Amino acid sequence: MGISIWQLLIILAIVLVLFGAKRLKNVGSDLGGAIKGFKKAVSDEDKKEDEKVTAEQKLEQKEGENVFDVKAEQKADEKSETKDKA
């Protein structure tokens, strides 16, 4: 009970008569341009997110390098003080 090939051909013929081949070509190119623009916008958004994540990871890595253990430093100071006393 679906649409047969003949029904599709009749619909296509009616559309061609109503709009003409030139206008259909313009509609097709406009639709293609819109799809291309949409894909570009989506990929640009993904690139921005990737750059943001990469920047955050680099920042976290730098922060991790600058962190040091205060207790270890205090223990080292205590050891040096005990050596100085001896």
Image: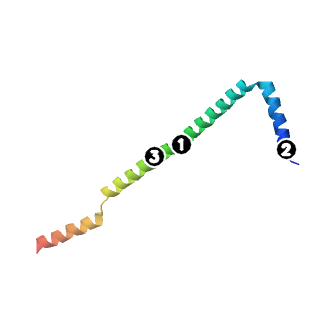
In contact (CB < 8 Å): disc 2 and disc 3: no
Residue at the far right in the pictured view:
1
Report the amino acid beneath label 1.
Ser
Residue that badge 1 annotates: 43
Residue 86 spot, x, y in % from top left = 10, 75
Report the amino acid beneath label 3.
Lys
Residue that badge 2 annotates: 4
Question: How far apart in space, not on screen, are marks 2 and 1 (Cα)?
Answer: 38 Å
Q: Earlier in the sequence, mark 2 or mark 3?
A: 2
Name the quadrant containing residue 16: top right
In contact (CB < 8 Å): disc 2 and disc 1: no
Residue 80 spot, x, y in % from top left = 16, 69
Question: How far apart in space, not on screen, are marks 2 and 3 (Cα)?
Answer: 51 Å
Residue 43 spot, x, y in % from top left = 54, 42
* Vertical position of residue 85 compared to residue 21: above or below: below
Element under disc 3? helix
Which of label 2 and label 3 is nearer to you?
2
Name the quadrant containing residue 14: top right
Report the amino acid beneath label 2.
Ser
Disc 3 packing (10 Å; few <14; some 14–19; many ≥20): few
* Vertical position of residue 38 compared to residue 61: above or below: above
Residue at horizontal 85 percent and vertical 40 percent from the top: 6
Q: Which mark is residue 52?
A: 3
Q: Which mark is residue 30?
A: none
Which of label 2 and label 1 is nearer to you?
2
Question: How far apart in space, not on screen, are marks 1 and 3 (Cα)?
Answer: 14 Å
Q: Is residue 83 left or right of residue 67?
A: left
Q: Is residue 24 left or right of residue 9?
A: left
Residue at horizontal 61 percent and vertical 32 percent from the top: 33
Disc 1 packing (10 Å; few <14; some 14–19; many ≥20): few
